[in-house]
Amino acid sequence: IRAAQESVGTDARIEAPSLSAQQVTAVERVDGVRAVAPIDYLSATVTNSRFSSVSVILADTGKLAAMRHLPDGLTRVVGGRVPVVVSSDVLRSMGSQRTATVQGVKVRVVGSLPAASGLGPTSQWMLVDEAFAPKFTDAFVPSTLLIAADPAKLGHLLAPLQKAVGVAPDADPFLSPITVTTAPQAVAERENEPVISGVRIGLIAGAAIATLLCILALVLATAAAAAARGRTAGILRKI
């Protein structure tokens, strides 16, 4: 269950080759949605550092802060450099170094998160606020939306989110270019996987067998005790 929830990264997640501003707005207006953090991904080369490449995650860090613990000041230049949050493996690679040049942009590390933080890449990444997107790319075009939702409405959020981004409720997830996933849906799908079902059946069967063996042992012990009591009673009568 925990793995399924971590695969979503938050209450709900939408992924697509690209998402328009209209689609993002439609998602934000869905009843039960509390915050939407659009994310764009880039690959970049790094100079003046101990690692050569990194995945750049562009996001609205103000909205993402509702779902992740982020440092303040990610929209303001620090000492002439762009402030960034890096994955824990990048931080280890940098040692005591806290500055680098990424795709020609001077950056300063001001924070770190676990590499597998549900943001997309699971290693070698760097988070940058979308305010600095023009320094890295021509346009900020999100391909992922992380969504924080009202817990009371999360269980009924899948269909409204699909409608907001133009996905039919019965669309094949393997054929649709846009995928919508909620944490409850991911958990349900994981629980219905053959392996999980098999483990569950095995545990139930094991518990049933253990119970039967305990009952059998109790019956045998009772029978053995009865026989012993019978022998003792016979000896006493002879005495």
Image (spheres, grey):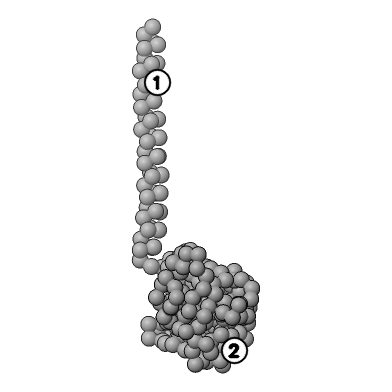
What residue sits 38% from the left and 30% below the top?
Answer: 221
> Going by the image, does 161 lie left or right of 93?
right
Residue 66 in the image, given as x and y percentages of width and height? 62, 74
Separation (CA) of disc 2 from disc 1: 82 Å
Numbered disc 2: secondary structure = helix
Q: Is residue 207 visible?
A: yes
**Which residue appears at 37% of the width and 38% of the height?**
216
The answer to whether residue 222 is left or right of residue 159 is left
The quarter of the picture where residue 74 lies is bottom right
Q: Quadrant of residue 72?
A: bottom right
Residue bearing mark 2: 25
Q: How far across and down, in percent of the image, does residue 188 sit?
A: 46, 69
The answer to whether marks 2 and 1 mark residues whose Cβ atoms lie closer than 8 Å is: no
Amino acid under disc 1: Arg
Q: Residue at x 45, y 75 (%)?
A: 48
- 179 or 68, nearer to the observer: 68
Name the mark nearer the viewer: 2 or 1: 2
> Can you identify the residue that label 1 sits on?
229
